[in-house]
Image: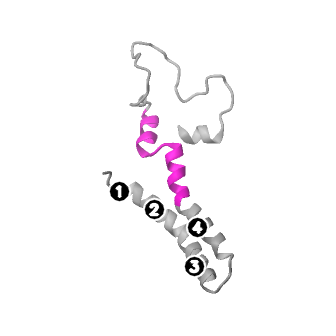
Amino acid sequence: MKRLGLFDMLQLAAGFSMAGPMFFIGIEFLRTGRPSGVGFLVVGAFALYFPTYLVNRIGGPKTWIRRRLGRPDSNSDTADTSSTDTADPTSPTDGDETSLLDRLRR
């Protein structure tokens, strides 16, 4: 079983800080008989899991450090280490502009 690290706890804290007030308002609305409380609960659930989704989508702290140091990904399928490519892995290959998400993934 994977233990929670410091970064995981920060993700949870960010999610709870955004979702906590929404859950509270949603429960209060449902308690007083207003059906719009369900909407607050749904938005609160989205806000709770969004920071974790975003970090998992972009990578994670180990991936960010690995990219900054220029080391190849440890789980890549390319086992050919004898190639002598001198191209910068962070530069776009086609000379095109990269999207914001691609820049965040580096």
Single out the mark in the foreground, 3 or 2: 3
Determine whether 91 is above or below 13 in the image: above
Q: Earlier in the sequence, mark 2 or mark 1?
A: 1
Pick whichever, 42 or 65, lies toward us.
42
Q: Which residue is mark 2?
A: 12
Q: Are marks 2 and 4 in contact (CB under 8 Å)?
A: no
Q: Which residue is mark 3?
A: 27
Q: Amino acid at mark 4?
A: Gly
Q: Give, as a single range, the part of the protein colored magenta.
A: 49-69
- Mark on residue 57? none
User: Measuring 53% from the left and 63% from the top, which residue is drawn there?
Assistant: 48
Label 2 sits on a secondary structure element that is helix
Q: Mark 3 or mark 1: which is in front?
A: 3
How far apart are the two marked residues, 4 and 3, measured between alpha carbons?
11 Å
Q: Which residue is labeled 4 in the image?
A: 44
- Whole-percent x and y of residue 2? 32, 51
Of callouts 1 and 4, which one flags the residue occurring earlier in the amino acid sequence? 1
Instruction: Name the residue: 57% across, 79% down.
Output: 27
Sequence-wise, which precedes: disc 3 or disc 1?
A: 1
Spatial distance from mark 3 to mark 1, Cα to Cα? 28 Å
Which of pointers 4 and 3 lies earlier in the amino acid sequence?
3
Q: In the rendering, at what x and y percent does residue 99 appear?
A: 66, 38
| CB within 8 Å, label 1 to label 4 | no
- Residue type at numbered disc 1: Leu
Based on the displayed image, in which of its 4 quarters is residue 102 positioned?
top right
Give coordinates of residue 54: x percent, y percent: 54, 50
Q: What amino acid does circle 3 point to? A: Ile
The residue at 66%/70% (across/down) is 39
Question: In the image, is residue 59 part of the stretch drawn in magenta?
Answer: yes
The answer for how far apart the CA atoms under marks 2 and 1 are is 10 Å
Of the two numbered discs 2 and 4 on the same chain, state the one appearing first in sequence. 2
